[in-house]
């Protein structure tokens, strides 16, 4: 809607993860490095956890984009699967066209051995893994047990909210928990990282000149607590309001309203945003 007004080639703060706008800030870079290093070492199960909006799906998509050709990807975006449905989803992702419930595990194992002989590394990515049922987790554990004398036939990466760690800490899931070799945790962005995050998205979208002042970016960081999704929401709403007012740069009241509309519990203590730079 406001692309032409600001001269953008794309929306800089769209909520859908856009790998073209990815900036390798420490929290996300470290998570990607943890997963890729663990896979290079042949580890079986890795978890990536973080609060809502910290960038788990972006990290997941970056991994998918960065994976080398020898990796056979199995992507499971829907965790609300029974153990039967999970096996079926994995079979379909591995290109197994015909299967039944009696032979499906054997069919998957045969396919994994075939891929291993072709020097393919099978990696299963599960998004929103905190929602997996106990039966689905058990099915993954059994697949993780499949191996040759020296190599795992299936590597599993779970992306989830902190509740995933709480789930896996339960006594009855201890067998699966013991198979987790590496863990990565996504944290919120610091002030410096948040400023770099905002600047990177504006610049890569074609911004000309200063649309947000440094004081504005500080206010956005404080209100969002450094959570990328909230940063995106605040900036998007502020740009939209600025467009409606036919302003070239974000004005204080537009940002003030965007913050209050997004994070009600983090309202600034002052009634009007006169301390954020421009007073208009």
Image: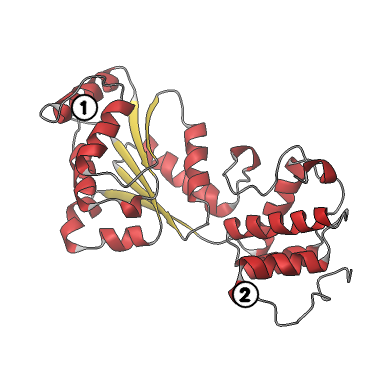
Residue shown at the point (85%, 58%) measured from the top left = 245
Instruction: Count residues near mark 1 (Cα–Cα under 10 Å), then give few for <14, some for 14-19, many for 20+.
Output: many
Of residues 161 and 193, the one nearer the viewer is 161
Instruction: Count residues near mark 2 (Cα–Cα under 10 Å), then give few for <14, some for 14-19, many for 20+.
Output: few
Q: Which residue is mark 1?
A: 108
Q: Is residue 220 left or right of residue 15?
A: right
Residue 263: horizontal and vertical position, in percent?
61, 69
User: Quadrant of residue 148 in the image?
Assistant: top left
Q: Earlier in the sequence, mark 2 or mark 1?
A: 1
Q: CA distance from mark 2 to mark 1?
A: 50 Å
Q: Residue furthest front?
A: 244
Q: Is residue 69 left or right of residue 122?
A: right
Q: Residue furthest left?
A: 102
Residue shown at the point (53%, 50%) measured from the top left = 28
Q: Is residue 114 left or right of residue 32?
A: left
Residue 222: horizontal and vertical position, in percent?
66, 70
- The quadrant the C terminus occupies is bottom right
User: Quadrant of residue 256 in the image?
Assistant: bottom right
Residue 277: horizontal and vertical position, in percent?
85, 69
Label 2 residue SS: helix
Of residues 249 and 122, the one nearer the viewer is 249
Residue shown at the point (48%, 38%) measured from the top left = 63
Residue 136: horizontal and vertical position, in percent?
23, 46
Q: Name the colour scheme.
A: secondary structure
User: Quadrant of residue 110 in the image?
Assistant: top left
- The quadrant the N terminus occupies is top right
Q: Is residue 134 above or below residue 119?
A: below
Q: Which residue is mark 2?
A: 266
Residue shown at the point (41%, 58%) measured from the top left = 161
Q: Is residue 84 left or right of residue 216?
A: left
């Amino acid at each position: 809607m406001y692309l032409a007004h600001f001269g953008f080639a794309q929306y800089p703060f769209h909520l859908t993860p856009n790998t073209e706008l990815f900036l390798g800030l420490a929290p996300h870079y470290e998570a990607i490095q943890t997963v890729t290093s663990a896979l290079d070492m042949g580890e079986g199960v890795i978890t990536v956890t973080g609060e809502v909006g910290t960038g788990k799906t972006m990290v997941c998509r970056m991994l998918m984009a960065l994976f080398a050709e020898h990796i056979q990807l199995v992507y499971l975006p829907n965790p609300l699967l029974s153990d039967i449905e999970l096996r079926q989803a994995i079979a379909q992702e591995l290109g197994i066209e015909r299967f039944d419930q009696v032979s499906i595990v054997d069919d998957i194992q045969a396919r994994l051995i075939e891929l291993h002989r072709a020097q393919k590394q099978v990696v299963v990515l599960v998004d929103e893994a905190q929602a997996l049922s106990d039966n689905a987790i058990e099915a993954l554990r059994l697949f993780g047990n499949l191996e040759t004398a020296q190599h795992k036939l299936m590597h599993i990466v779970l992306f989830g909210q902190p509740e995933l760690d709480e789930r896996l800490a339960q006594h009855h899931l201890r067998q699966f928990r013991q198979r987790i070799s590496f863990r990565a945790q996504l944290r919120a962005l610091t002030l410096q990282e948040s400023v770099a995050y905002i600047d990177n998205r504006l610049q890569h979208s074609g911004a000309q000149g200063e649309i947000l002042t440094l004081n504005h970016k500080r206010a956005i960081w404080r209100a969002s607590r450094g959570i990328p999704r909230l940063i995106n929401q605040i900036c998007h709403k502020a740009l939209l309001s600025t467009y409606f007012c036919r302003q070239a740069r974000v004005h204080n009241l537009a940002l003030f309203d965007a913050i209050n509309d997004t994070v009600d519990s983090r309202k600034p203590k002052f009634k009007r945003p006169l301390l954020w730079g421009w007073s208009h």
